[in-house]
Amino acid sequence: MKPILLALAFIGGLLIASAGIGATSPAKHLAAVAREADSVVIEFYTSAGREEVAFADKPWLERLAGILERSSYVPQSHCLCISYPQIRLYRNKELTGTLSVHHGTKLRAYAGSVSGDFTVGAQVGQEIAGLAKERKPD
């Protein structure tokens, strides 16, 4: 291969790697974590204190995955607040992801390669919080 072509191929490879081409988007990654989960624990803060609801419900997880998959994610600085409900996803009894909605428009996600606070918008925040509230203890 001629030196100029070799150099262009090398530079092209660097540009592709630095652009993150081939990397999984937060939407795809979080949706996959939800779909692969086999159980969920949602922690609520109620007048009785903190309460946890544990369940296994594949249709519920698929609904969560759909919301996560169609969302756009804009990374934000960590706001240092705590918000309930907190959704914990498990696969084979191993914690694979934690999600919570902050300030109505941010999603805090800890799920492997996708970790941090993301602006997702009020509609997505409401959908995720609403889904969690379906399981809220009386």
Image: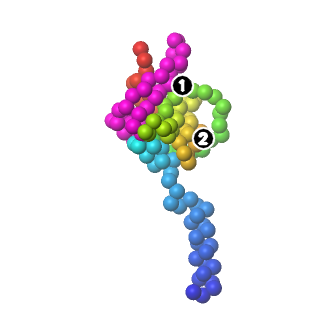
Image quadrant for the C terminus?
top left
Amino acid bearing label 1: Tyr
The quarter of the displayed image where residue 58 is located: top left
State the residue in front, 76 or 3.
3
- Count of marks, rendered view: 2
Image position, residue 39 (x, y; %): 41, 34
State the residue in front, 73 or 137.
137
Q: CA distance from mark 2 to mark 1?
A: 16 Å
Residue at the (63%, 84%) spot, across then down:
4
Image quadrant for the N terminus?
bottom right
Quick check: 126 above or below 2? above
Q: Residues within 10 Å of mark 2 (few under 14, many from 20)?
A: some
Magenta range: 37-66
Image position, residue 109 (x, y; %): 55, 39
Image position, residue 79 (x, y; %): 65, 33
- In the picture, measured across the screen, residue 65 lies left or right of residue 118, that is left
Q: Is residue 35 magenta?
A: no
Q: Which residue is mark 2?
A: 116
Amino acid bearing label 2: Gly
Please, which colouring scheme is shown?
rainbow
Residue at the (49%, 33%) spot, across then down:
88
Q: Tell me whether the residue at label 2 lies in contact with that at label 1, contact meaning CB atoms closer than 8 angstroms.
A: no
The quarter of the displayed image where residue 78 is located: top right
Is residue 28 in sight in this rendering? Answer: yes
Q: Is residue 62 magenta?
A: yes
Is residue 119 in sight in this rendering? Answer: no
Q: Which residue is mark 1?
A: 84
